[in-house]
Image (tube, grey):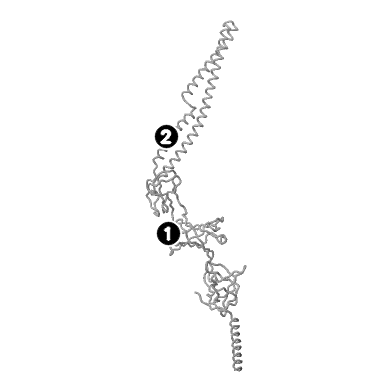
Amino acid sequence: MAFTLGRRLRIIVAAALVLTAVLVYISSRGSTARVAVVNVVRENLSSVVSTNGKVEPVTPISFRATFSTFVDQVSGVEGQQVKRGQLIFALDDKETSAQLAQARADLSGQEEALRVAKAGGNADQITKTAADLQKAQASWEQLRRDNESLVKLVAQKAATPQELEQNRLMLTQAEADVKSLEKMKATLKEQSQMDSERVALLVDRGQTEVRDLEGKVASARGAAPFDGTLYSLPIRKGDFVKEGDLLAEMADLHQVRIRAFIDEPELGQIDVNQPVEILWDAHPDRTWTGRTEVVPKQVVTHGTRNVGELLCSVSNDRLDLIPNTTVDVRIHISERPDVLVVPRGAVYIEGSTRFVFRVENSRLHRRYIKVGIANPTMIEVLSGLDQGDVVALPGDISLKENLRIVPVRQE
């Protein structure tokens, strides 16, 4: 029995040693995980900045109410193609037309008053004053000559001093009459000038009022100034509109503009005349093309982002792109043919360096690389990898140096 127990004990100890050796061996081989991997391949690569944007007409025309009134007629339909001169809407302008007629009548009276003022004032009063002055001057001149004669006659004792004194009194009165009439004439002239300036101001105001009312009456009938698309028509017949309310918007939509919102860190890559692709969820099968046109000159707040607003010119021959819609924008920064690429997700950043986990004999090894241009999914490899190398992709398992894996190929 003792022999049997001793033998069993040795067997147990031996088994424990074997199990320990197996565990040590397994531990030395490392754990095994299923990890997605891809090959390093060559392909043409475009560096792309992707963002969102807004469709805008290039030369929009907005019709707004210039006075408060009711809508009499709506002749267009939103989205309709309109021809130059085609009526879109008409507003009730009866009250404004009556105001225009009164303003024109007032202006006519003011212009006549200005003509009279410039002529010197009231014609009858001016004529009477001029005639009275002429008579007074003639009387004064005659009395002056009589005075000279009487002075000589008195000296010759051919006239009495009383006659000379009486003449002097009449001469003094005549001189006073002449001065009074000259002053009256000057006053009339000054008053005429003042009236002319005052009436001229009234005429200027009247002309401005007439022009303003003429513009309002003309704006009551909204007609297309050119061939285009009526893309906004928020009014209906019978609506009451206030001054400044939007009545209609139209534009030639064969060429539209995209206002693309570029995040601040990507602004340095943007330049004029770069190719642009536009995608819109409403037409997932369509892609519109264009070019960058006006690069951002400042950074503004757009929601929670700091962006520069890039303007792009886009062809819209089929008139599918509608103003004010939100679209996806892809700006092609540069093109590189036949370059080594790996998925962007396979590249890790460590300070200023980049690295991938290269698969060798089912184990991961860190490999530092230099990178070039990139698009949203792929990045160019300048050095550190060769075509056909296999790199690991991130997943549920944390990747690390020397990790043993089961590679799972990804297409």
Would you say 35 lies left or right of 79 here?
right
Instruction: Please say if 12 is above or below 236.
Output: below
Numbered tag placed on residue 320 in the rendering: 1
Identified at 61% across, 69% down, the residue is 350
**For residue 105, which numbered disc appears in the image?**
2
User: Left or right of 324: which side holds 394?
Assistant: right
Asked if the residue at tag 2 contacts the one at tag 1, i.e. Cβ–Cβ closer than 8 Å, the answer is no
Residue 129 at x, y = what percent? 50, 21
Q: Is residue 58 above or below residue 367?
A: above
Residue type at mark 2 is Ala
Residue at 52% across, 29% down: 194
Name of the residue lying farthest toward the front: 1
Figure check: 15 above or below 235 = below
Question: In terms of secondary structure, where does tag 2 sit?
Answer: helix
Q: Report the residue at 48% width, 23% height from top.
A: 125
> How many numbered marks, from 0 up?
2
Q: Image quadrant of residue 271?
A: bottom right
Q: Spatial distance from mark 1 to mark 2, Cα to Cα? A: 52 Å
Residue 204: give x, y in percent of width and height: 48, 36
User: How packed is label 2: few (under 14 Cα within 10 Å), some, or many (20 or more)?
Assistant: few
Secondary element at tag 1 = loop
Q: Is residue 215 left or right of residue 376?
A: left
Question: Where is residue 122 shown, x and y percent of the image?
Answer: 47, 26
